[in-house]
Amino acid sequence: QELLVESGGNSVQSGGSLRLSCATSGFTFSRYCMGWFRQSPGKEREAVAVIDRDDKASYTDSVKGRFTISQDDAKTTLYLQMNSLKPEDTAIYYCAVDSYRNPPRLDPVFWNYWGKGTQVTVSS
């Protein structure tokens, strides 16, 4: 059974850093695209960073140069290193899998497996 479990969310001050983790089971990374999405109150869920089957990473413009998506050598855990955090980064962060497409589409509707999310709060 496929399972995604996020962790690492916390409350930090502006300029701080966090590292989110997504523990997976039932997936083979090389066969799927993986990604991090976020959703804040009143806003639609948006792609933050995705990595395709060829390990090519893509980022939304607002996080370029600050966030880094990666995976461990065993390819069972997905990470999101978040530096220079800003209040507008406050959101619930979700780990997701697109098992159909490569390269992945950034619209969340195309992603078919989701974790339950982890809260990130950045105060000014």
Image (cartoon, rainbow, N blue to C red):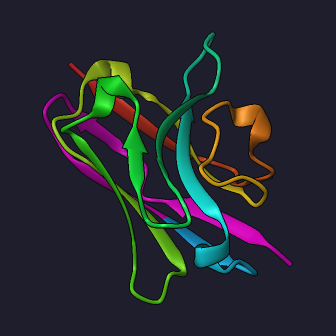
Q: Quadrant of residue 92?
A: top right
Task: Tell me which residue sits at (59%, 50%) in the image.
Answer: 103
Q: Picture coordinates of residue 100 (x, y %)?
A: 78, 56
Q: Nearer the viewer, residue 10 or 40?
A: 40
Task: Tell me which residue sits at (26%, 38%) in the image.
Answer: 12
Q: Nearer the viewer, residue 15 or 72?
A: 72
Q: Picture coordinates of residue 73 (x, y %)?
A: 39, 86
Residue 62 vertical position relative to residue 6 in the rendered view, above or below: above
Q: The N terminus is located in which quarter?
A: bottom right
Q: Is residue 85 found left or right of 25 in the rendered image?
A: left
Q: Picture coordinates of residue 115 (x, y %)?
A: 69, 55
Residue 39 vertical position relative to residue 53 in the rendered view, above or below: above
Q: Nearer the viewer, residue 110 or 63?
A: 110
Task: Tell me which residue sits at (66%, 80%) in the image.
Answer: 28
Residue span colored magenta: 1-21
Q: Is residue 71 found left or right of 67 in the rendered image?
A: right
Q: Picture coordinates of residue 121 (x, y %)?
A: 38, 32
Q: The C terminus is located in which quarter?
A: top left
Q: Is residue 15 magenta?
A: yes
Q: Nearer the viewer, residue 28 or 12?
A: 28
Q: Quadrant of residue 47?
A: top right
Q: Is residue 81 magenta?
A: no
Q: Is residue 78 found left or right of 57 in the rendered image?
A: right
Residue at the limit of the structure toward the right, as seen here:
1
Residue at the limit of the structure toward the bottom, as seen here:
74
